[in-house]
Image (tube, helix red, strand yellow):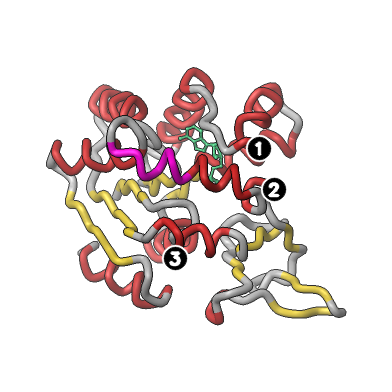
């Protein structure tokens, strides 16, 4: 099963993605997380991408598109859940073309709908687990609240160290990421509309303002 998951930064897209990965066993491919692991590993790609990411700008397509398409092709047999890509109309077109060429079929498009201001407030409370990117932690949500150990907040799943993303604490960077997401001319909303209009894949639009479990239930009901 191949799924695209859309939602503004802060909509709970990563949390839902981790749940779907666990349930269906497909690969959860997150473009932002791939970039962060390149930055951590000090690779050439990481060095080139870092300044864009810190500012909340898109990393140029000539770096991003090949990186994502290569990762997708490795998951061809297992199926994938793609998160964070496409983020623009141009990326949507490139993805569509690559899928047609490789014989991969897009089965579902999941869209988590959330008001921009609510999404912004949520971003600042999320925490990253040092051990596993699929361990969601958020200081404002009871269901995924980090736990306290020796006076420190640690990952609620594995006890791993938690950190914040620099671009999550920078209001200008958040605004930029949301400008890109809510742009329906050539930004991410244009990419969502591209796949909605194209047809073929089932589109599942869910309200992201309800509790995490309810969002999951809404998605699972449609992913039959
Ligand atoms: P995310 O973890 O999805 O919030 O992504 C973090 C950052 O990685 C973004 O703000 C961009 O700078 C970069 N990034 C992630 N996905 C893409 C993409 N599809 N195209 C360009 N840049 C991206």
In the picture provided, is 5 more to the left or to the right than 28? Answer: left
Circle 2 sits on which residue? 166
| Residue 216 position within the rendered picture, expressed as x and y whole percent measured from the top left | 36, 70
In the foreground, 142 or 174: 174
Mark 2 neighbour class, 10 Å CA radius: few under 14, some 14 to 19, many 20 or more: few
* Discs 2, 1 touching: Cβ within 8 Å: yes
Task: Spot the residue most to the right.
Answer: 150
Mark 1 neighbour class, 10 Å CA radius: few under 14, some 14 to 19, many 20 or more: some
**Secondary structure beneath disc 1?**
helix
Magenta-highlighted residues: 178-184
Mark 3 neighbour class, 10 Å CA radius: few under 14, some 14 to 19, many 20 or more: some
Task: Spot the residue most to the top.
Answer: 62
Question: Is the CB of the residue bearing disc 3 within 8 angstroms of ligand 1?
Answer: no
| Residue 106 position within the rendered picture, expressed as x and y whole percent measured from the top left | 25, 41
The correct choice, above or below, for 177 with respect to 26 in the image is above
User: Residue visible at 29% across and 50% down?
Assistant: 1
- Label 2 to label 1: alpha-carbon separation: 7 Å
* Discs 1, 3 touching: Cβ within 8 Å: no
In the picture provided, is 188 more to the left or to the right than 47? Answer: left
- Quadrant where the C terminus is found in the figure: bottom left
User: Residue visible at 46% across and 50% down?
Assistant: 28
- Label 1 to label 3: alpha-carbon separation: 28 Å
Circle 1 sits on which residue? 54
Closer to the eye: label 1 or 3: 1
**Secondary structure beneath disc 3?**
helix
Question: Is the CB of the residue bearing disc 2 within 8 angstroms of ligand 1?
Answer: no
* Most common secondary structure along the magenta stretch: helix
In the foreground, 207 or 30: 207
User: Residue visible at 56% across and 81% down?
Assistant: 142
Circle 3 sits on which residue? 19
């Amino acid at each position: 099963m191949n799924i695209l998951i859309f939602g503004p930064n802060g909509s709970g897209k990563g949390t839902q993605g981790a749940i779907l990965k666990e349930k269906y066993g497909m690969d959860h491919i997150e473009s932002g997380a791939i970039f962060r692991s390149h930055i951590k590993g000090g690779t050439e790609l990481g060095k080139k991408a870092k300044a864009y990411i810190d500012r909340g700008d898109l990393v140029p397509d000539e770096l991003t598109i090949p990186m994502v398409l290569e990762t997708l092709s490795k998951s061809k047999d297992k199926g994938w859940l793609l998160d964070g890509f496409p983020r623009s109309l141009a990326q949507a077109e490139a993805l569509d073309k690559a899928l047609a060429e490789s014989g991969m079929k897009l089965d579902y498009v999941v869209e988590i709908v959330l008001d921009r201001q609510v999404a912004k407030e949520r971003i600042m409370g999320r925490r990253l687990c040092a051990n596993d990117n699929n361990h969601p932690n958020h200081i404002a949500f009871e269901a995924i609240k980090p736990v306290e150990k020796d006076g420190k907040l640690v990952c609620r799943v594995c006890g791993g160290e938690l950190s914040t993303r620099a671009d999550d604490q920078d209001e200008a960077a958040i605004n930029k990421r949301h400008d890109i997401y809510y742009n329906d001319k050539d930004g991410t909303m244009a990419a969502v509309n591209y796949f909605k209009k194209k047809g073929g894949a089932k589109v599942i639009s869910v309200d992201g303002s309800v509790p995490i479990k309810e969002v999951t239930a809404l998605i699972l009901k449609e992913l039959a």
